[in-house]
Amino acid sequence: MHDARLLLDPATDAAAKLRRRGYVLDTDRLGKLVSRRSEVIGQGDQARARSKKAAADVQAAARRGEDITGLREEARQLKVRIGELEEEQREVETELNELLLGIPNLPLDELPDGATEEYAEEVRRWGTPPEFDFEVLDHVDLGERAGFLDLGRATKLSGPRFAVFKNAGARLERALAAFFLDIHTREHGYTEFSLPALVTRQTMTGTGQLPKFEEDLFRTGVAERELFLIPTAEVPLVNLHAGELLQLEDLPLRYTAHTPCFRSEAGSYGRDTRGLIRQHEFSKVELVQFVEAEKSREALEEILTHAEAPLQRLGLAYRVIKLPAGDIGFSAQITYDVEVWMPSQQTYREISSASDTGVFQARRANIRGKGKDGKRGAVATLNASGLPIGRTLVALIEQNQQADGSIVLPEALVPYTGFSKINKDGTIS
């Protein structure tokens, strides 16, 4: 959660920064709430001091044998007033916190202006998009023809935007997850976690999914217990340290997990309705880092290369773009998108986002840092997809389709799948 004082500090220029991402900061309301909170806290402190003195006066008068009726009434009224001020403080702080929780992170000045991807800044490209001298099929046609993708039965089970994989498809999913995790744990130094897919409202609030994006989440509950299905492993990974004091000398911490992810895709109906690009349920390997705040920008460049590494091992052509200020996520202060080439669409599509959230999530989740000297230091969090299984599979089979209808797998993946080729009829070799 933001520090209200920093948002109101002219030196921060928060209102102008937030306008770049399309958010209008109500500085008048914010200022009034901050002032009223300070006033109420001050009045409460004064009332408690007077109450303490009144209690002492009652005791002293009683020892002297004096009539204490008036003094007792004064002490009683002060206690009532203290209760009223404490209730008003709670109300003001609740309103202030609700306002602060809905304010997105401040974008870094280096981001280009604009609210859509067309304003993004291309950083680099890797690989050459394949060219074909035959009719290119999309992943749906390739998968259903070979029998390893069944969208029809998925719809029967759960409705649209779900998928069923079988045989080579199911093995390929499993292989990709293991492949990604091995790269990140063995080469990049990430600690692997197995995590719950259901988390509390407080956990979702810590990473910024709530309260603003509740319509994008799947919520469940048994009796009075409310839980949310995670949209990404970033949520539980970051909140592993919620409410904790981290030792700065232990940073950076690098965490990864392969989990199912659930998204309602509210507002996206009519977009990417065919195939695996936009699903309600998919699986993904996520990367999260905890670093000292002043090192977060440097760490972003590192975590970005970690997200790119599996694509390079698989030989998949992609590009990296820096998103404009109006297109970054709620919790991010800067985001790079990695976009992989999709032959059937003849364009690059997002496969990973690498974001530096600065101290934004750490403040919301109350994650603090302390050095060896005992001094407090700010902790920053970063995240990146490393990678989603479905979208990687889409790019993999589309970029590696052959004229005879088969799909040839990259050599790096063969030890994980146990086969190097999916034939047109679905058999493997």
Image (cartoon, helix red, strand yellow):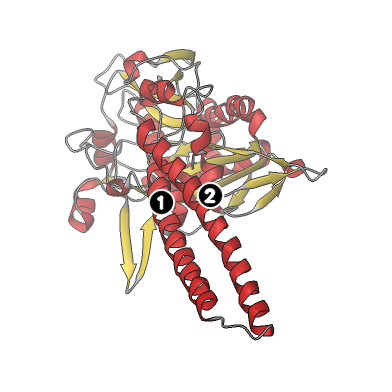
Q: Which residue is mark 2?
A: 365
Q: Decide: marks 1, 2 in contact (CB < 8 A)?
A: no
Residue located 23% across and 46% down the image: 151
- The tag on residue 92 is 1
Q: Can the viewer see residue 208?
A: no
Specify few, some or many for label 1: CA neighbours under 10 Å numbering under 14, 14-19, or 20 or more: some
Specify few, some or many for label 2: CA neighbours under 10 Å numbering under 14, 14-19, or 20 or more: many
How far apart in space, not on screen, are marks 1 and 2 (Cα)? Answer: 21 Å
Residue 284 at x, y percent in the picture: 45, 44
**Tag 1: residue type?**
Val
- Side of 48 relative to 283 (left or right): right
- Side of 400 relative to 286 (left or right): left
Q: Can the viewer see residue 412?
A: yes
Q: Nearer the viewer, mark 1 or mark 2?
A: 1
**Vertical relation: 206 (above or below) 355:** below
Residue located 48% across and 59% down the image: 196
- The tag on residue 176 is none
Residue 149 at x, y percent in the picture: 29, 44
Q: Nearer the viewer, residue 209 or 170?
A: 209
**Tag 2: residue type?**
Ala
Q: Nearer the viewer, residue 201 or 187?
A: 201
**Vertical relation: 139 (above or below) 134:** below
Q: Secondary structure at mark 2?
A: loop
Q: Secondary structure at mark 1?
A: helix
Q: Nearer the viewer, residue 102 or 108?
A: 102
**Vertical relation: 318 (above or below) 395:** above
Residue 58 at x, y percent in the picture: 61, 77
- The answer to which of marks 1 and 2 sits earlier in the sequence is 1
Which image quarter is the C terminus in? top left
- Side of 143 relative to 173 (left or right): left
